[in-house]
Structure formats: C-alpha cells, structure tokens
Image (cartoon, grey):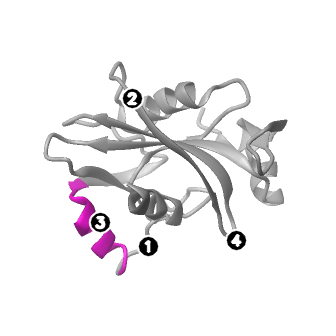
Amino acid sequence: MYAPAKEIVQIVDRDNREIDALPRHLMRSRGLIHRASYILVFNDQEEIFVQKRTTTKDIYPGYWDVAAGGVVLASESYEQSASRELAEELGISGIPLTPLFDHYFEDATNRVWGRVFRCTHEGPFTLQPEEVEYGRFMPIPQILQYSRQEPFTPDGILILQQI
C-alpha cells in the first residue's frame, strides 16, 4: 500500500547532521530540515527527463520536476534513497548513478539537504501513477525558459542553475 505520510524520514540540522527520525507528515507539518535524493535522468542528447508531478503530492503538487527522487528514509544513505526512488518513480534500476554535489534549499514550505546524482537512460519508463502524471525529455535551456511560464519545483530549478 502506498502511504508516504507514514515513511520515517531522516531529520538533520543546518549542518546536515542527523538529529532525529520522524514520520514524513510531522516533518512537513513542522517544517523540519530533512534529506532528499535528486536524480537527473539524461538521454544521449544530454536532455533531461522532466516529469509532471501529480496533484496529490504533499509538496509542489502539479509542478514540473527536473529530477526523480525524494526523501531519504531514516535507514538509508543518499545512494540507497536515489536507487530506490529511481526504481519507484521511473522503473529504472541497475544503472550507475554519478553523484554531482550536495546542496541546501529552503523556501516557505521546504527545508532540505539534497544530494544530486545523474544517470543516462533512454527509456522506456514505468511511471509511478501516485507520483508522476507524465514526462518527456527536454534540453536544459528549454526547461529554464519553460519554467518562466509553468510552475517548476524551485529546488529543481536551483539545481539546473548550478550545473
């Protein structure tokens, strides 16, 4: 059964030190800093697979997202989270993930330490219906231009600006 609100999430401080483990719904309601994995899925033309988030997501519902990924569970490393999330959201497994960088993001609804990974995959994808409505490959300049007209996850756009 799909129940993300009950996931036990790794809570960290501003220096990314582990301080607690709490259910996801408490992390969100209290605005706590947590960890997340972000996986940029490139094709051979260096375009990124961009996904439309479902309207039932607990954060940024209905937004476009440049990365697969999600919260790091209390029992996971960033790498384990990235592999799990990539398999769950897009049906991709058994491919190498290259870590790019760690970054901190904060806005009014989200405070997160993230580790960004990249991989190459041409598809096909098996989209998780609870998380992803649909997706397509886009070149980075087109994504940045499109983000001025459509809502994109702000942490994802920050990641694109850093690469």
Left or right relative to 12: residue 3: left
Q: Which residue is mark 2?
A: 97
Q: Which residue is mark 4?
A: 108
Q: Earlier in the sequence, mark 2 or mark 1?
A: 2
**Residue type, numbered disc 1:** Pro
Q: Residue at x 40, y 63 (%)?
A: 161
Image coordinates for residue 139, horizontal then vertical, percent: 21, 59
* Label 2 environment density (alpha carbons within 10 Å; few <14, some 14–19, many ≥20): some
Left or right relative to 35: residue 26: right
Q: Quadrant of the N terminus?
A: top right
Left or right relative to 56: residue 120: left
Q: Which residue is mark 1?
A: 151
Residue reaching furthest to the bottom? 149
Q: Secondary structure at mark 4?
A: loop
Residue 150 is drawn in which quadrant? Answer: bottom left
Q: Earlier in the sequence, mark 3 or mark 1?
A: 3
Q: Secondary structure at mark 3?
A: helix
Image coordinates for residue 93, horizontal then vertical, percent: 36, 23
Q: CA distance from mark 2 to mark 4?
A: 30 Å
Q: CA distance from mark 4 to mark 1?
A: 16 Å
Q: Which segment is the magenta one?
A: 137-148
Out of 74 and 116, give the one closest to the viewer.
116
Q: CA distance from mark 3 to mark 1?
A: 11 Å
Q: Which residue is mark 3?
A: 143
- Inspect the magenta stretch and tell me whether residue 138 lies in it: yes
Q: CA distance from mark 3 to mark 2?
A: 22 Å
Q: Secondary structure at mark 1?
A: loop
